[in-house]
Amino acid sequence: MSMEIRLVGVTKSFSGNQVIRPSDLTIESGSFTTLLGPSGCGKTTLLRMMAGLESPDTGEIYFDETCVFSAVKHINIPPEKRGLGFVFQDFALWPHMTVFENVAFGLRARKETQDLQKRVMEALRAVQLEGCAQRYPHQLSGGQQQRVAFARAIVIEPACVLFDEPLSALDAILREEMRHELREIVSRLNLTAVFVTHDQTEAMSMSDRIAVLYQGRIEQYDTPEQIYRRPATPFVAHFVGKANWFSDTKLVRPEALSLVPAEGCQLFELPVTGVQYLGDTYEIILRYNGVFWILHSSQKPAVGSVISVYIDPQNIILLQKEKT
Amino acid sequence: MRQLSATRKSVLPLIGLLVILGVLIVCPLIMIFAEAVISDGRLDFSGAWAMIADSGNLQTIWNSLRLGLCVVLCSTVIAVPTAYLLARTQLAKRRWLDIIFMIPFMTPPYIASMGWILFMQKRGLFQQLFPSSGSFSEKFFCFGGLVLVMSLHVFPFLMTMMKNAISNIPASLEESGAVFGAGFGRRLRKIFAPLLTGNYAIGALLVFVKTLAEYGTPYTLGRRIGYYVFTTDIHRYSTTAPIDFGRSASLSAVLVAICMGLWLLQNHITDRCSYRLVGGKGSRPAATTLHPAGHLLAWVWAAVVALAAIGIPYFSIISTSLIHLRGYGLTPGNFTFAHYAELFTTPKSLRAIQTSLFLASASAVICSALGTAVVLAARRRKGKLGKAVEAVSLLPEMLPSIVLIIGMMLFWNAIYKTIPLYNTIGIMVLAYVALYLPYTVQYVTSAFAQINDSLMQAGRTFGGSPSYVFCRITLPMIFKGILSGWMMIFIIAFRELVTASLIAPPNVLVVSTYINREFEQGSVSLGMAMAVLCVLITTAALLIMNGLSGRKERKT
């Protein structure tokens, strides 16, 4: 019960402004794929195109071998015929329906009313809300509303669930809880999931693959590890993780900096401009050639002192010059 | 000790206000009910009931309710599609359409219905424009015509409510419907319509109440076709011999009971059926892009509504005001500005304008002061007393104005020997103040709602005394609200008809009664020239208000 989604050469402009540059993207069947990028990068637009809520200007979209959109062939299957699950950023629960009716909506709309009661309750059980079936959305907490939105998406047993920043309306603690819960259910039900977020921690921790978007372009599409260790462009290096820059195209991640000498390491003598205590570690701010570097350490150097920092040249990342 | 005296100090102004409002609003209302149930100095409920159950009265009540219901239906047909077009489609980008569709609501209803009468009557403008149509246009003078004219006046109110309600539905609620497999029809039935039911019920109820309370159109058009409703009958019994205040009071009492009941129902619906549509993060308004043909149809619809609601009445009023000799009608060479010149040269019309200007500005000033005091006092001491003062000040909003005016007539007549205010211009000012006080209270309250209490607390923290904080922080921030209230009152008071026709001293004319008198038994063209002038003055006031508040906003 999962499927591959393929986007071929899709573009989209809003009032003359191209928000999606020509893009190809293949979401692998059964994977958890995240579209990551700053606000306005086009990630939500891309997701809404898959759902059919937005029509691309050009290009084609395939669900497995079925073409659901083609600008050339004038194919555009409406959202209600695409059979996807969707979790909205604002949850989009219907305020005039009970939790049960919200979840049952998709089944009723598809006329799959056999075992309706059982299937709805099963979905609610999956999100631990069986006790809340007769309540209204406004009687639930933010986290519970989120779970209802999720139950509504999985009850129709879609081949793929799309998530549009579903955790951004929750507070920090709840967000982390839901992150685990959501990932767990998606794995258990073996769904294909496409997840949109601007939060790199969310993206890194949940995804099998991440597509980093910037200004309507897919900058890199890879596993979280590769994106962190081998960023393809300066933007990706900037946006994902922290970076200590030598120049515009040369950087090193903070954890590659060491206060202990080792074989083959380069030595840098750097002044300490600030120290912050983070509980498990000290974050030390250093100055290198007019830019600030970050180093985590269990020791607390004095502000103003100069310390020795060692870097293994193998850990230095070189980037291609940014295309302009 | 000090705390006690501080509490007393904040109670005193409230009690003072309660006394003022009591005399202004509560006593007149009590007088109505007293007049309705007391005959020859004795409580006489059976007599009161007999008077209400009189077949003539029952007919009036039935007429009113039937009219209200039909106006609700008719204005729904006009308002709901227009609201949808203005909220969702390409027409939403044309903000000027919002202003266009507010014009009918801002036009005094008696002026609009005079426009319709001039257009449709025998040898009227329609027959002059389309001579071959014969007497077709005279069919307009029936119940349906009355419903149409009243609906065209009141529909913008319902339309604005529905438009806001539609815009408040986040796009995602319908999109999720689509994603989960519901086609357009199902989304309309299961999501869109249920979400709007509460708002529609409230809007429809308010239209119903407004129709019951409306006097201008039933007076000008309804009387002509012999259709009498609450307001026209109340007016008839209190002004035309044989004057029967008991009858008008009992009708008033029934009208008050109906209106209050509907208000309660409205509150109940607001509590029960309105949904908190969480705006917040990531919610966007929805938009529908119509096909070119649909787009064209939408514009045709908007144009037809605008033509009926604005085009016809204004065409009639303006052209009539410019016609030299009505017998010749719309022919070249038969146009003149003489009627306007006459307005500014004859003492009778000049006095009417002066009186209206005086009444409008005086009542607006008093309302602003009194209303602001009410809001301030009620905010300083939120208790039962504060709530009571606020509630009384808002009471006139819920009552048909004719009822309050009848009450004032009865009350001030009764105490004439103590305070000889009746039959003077003073009683008019007082009546206007009572009627329009809710505007100031509402505007100032909403101005307060926009300022955070911490702003005032910050003023106190940085060493300002209460009066200093009031003058330097509170007052400047609520001033816009006061000003808006002032202008609103000025505009509505300037053209007020029912109060002036009931309570004006002999030989005192205001703009509205002047127009009415000229329309009925003088020079229609002169009356219409005054009507145009009246609309121009009130529009100018509105533009000034918008200009002022716009400039203030840019500065902050």
Image (cartoon, coloured by chain):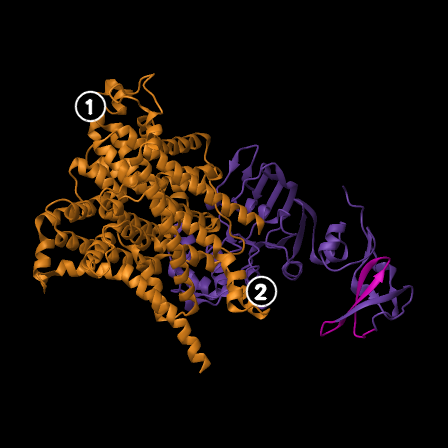
The three-letter code of the residue at mark 2 reads Arg
Is A23 left, or right, of A269 in this rendering?
Answer: left
Q: How many marks?
A: 2
Frontmost residue, A26 versus B230: B230
Which chain wears purple?
A: A
Which marked residue is nearer to the observer: mark 1 or mark 2? 1
Q: Are marks 1 and 2 on the same chain?
A: no
Q: Is residue B82 visible to the viewer in this orientation of the structure? A: yes
Label 1 neighbour load within 10 Å: few <14, some 14-19, many 20+: some
Q: In the rendering, which numbered label is found on residue B135?
A: 1
Q: What residue is drawn where x is 72% and y is 74%?
A: A280
Q: Position of residue B171 (x, y in %)?
A: 48, 48
Label the magenta part by its dominant secondary structure: strand
Residue with the most extreme top position:
B332
Do we see residue B158 in this rendering?
no
Q: Which of the pair B45/B462 is nearer the observer?
A: B462
Residue under numbered circle 2 = A175
Which span is picked out in magenta?
A277-301
Q: Where on the picture, by quarter, is residue A206?
A: bottom right
- What's the distance in space between the residues labelled 1 and 2, CA to CA? 74 Å
Mark 2 neighbour class, 10 Å CA radius: few under 14, some 14 to 19, many 20 or more: some
Chain appearing in orange on the rendered image: B
Horizontal side, residue A30 vs residue A79: left or right: right
Give the answer, above or below, for where B15 lies relative to B541: below
**Discs 1, 2 touching: Cβ within 8 Å:** no
Frontmost residue, A120 versus B154: B154
The N terminus of chain B lies in quadrant = bottom left
Q: Position of residue B288 (x, y in %)?
A: 46, 40
Q: Judging from the image, what secondary structure is the residue with disc 2 in?
A: helix
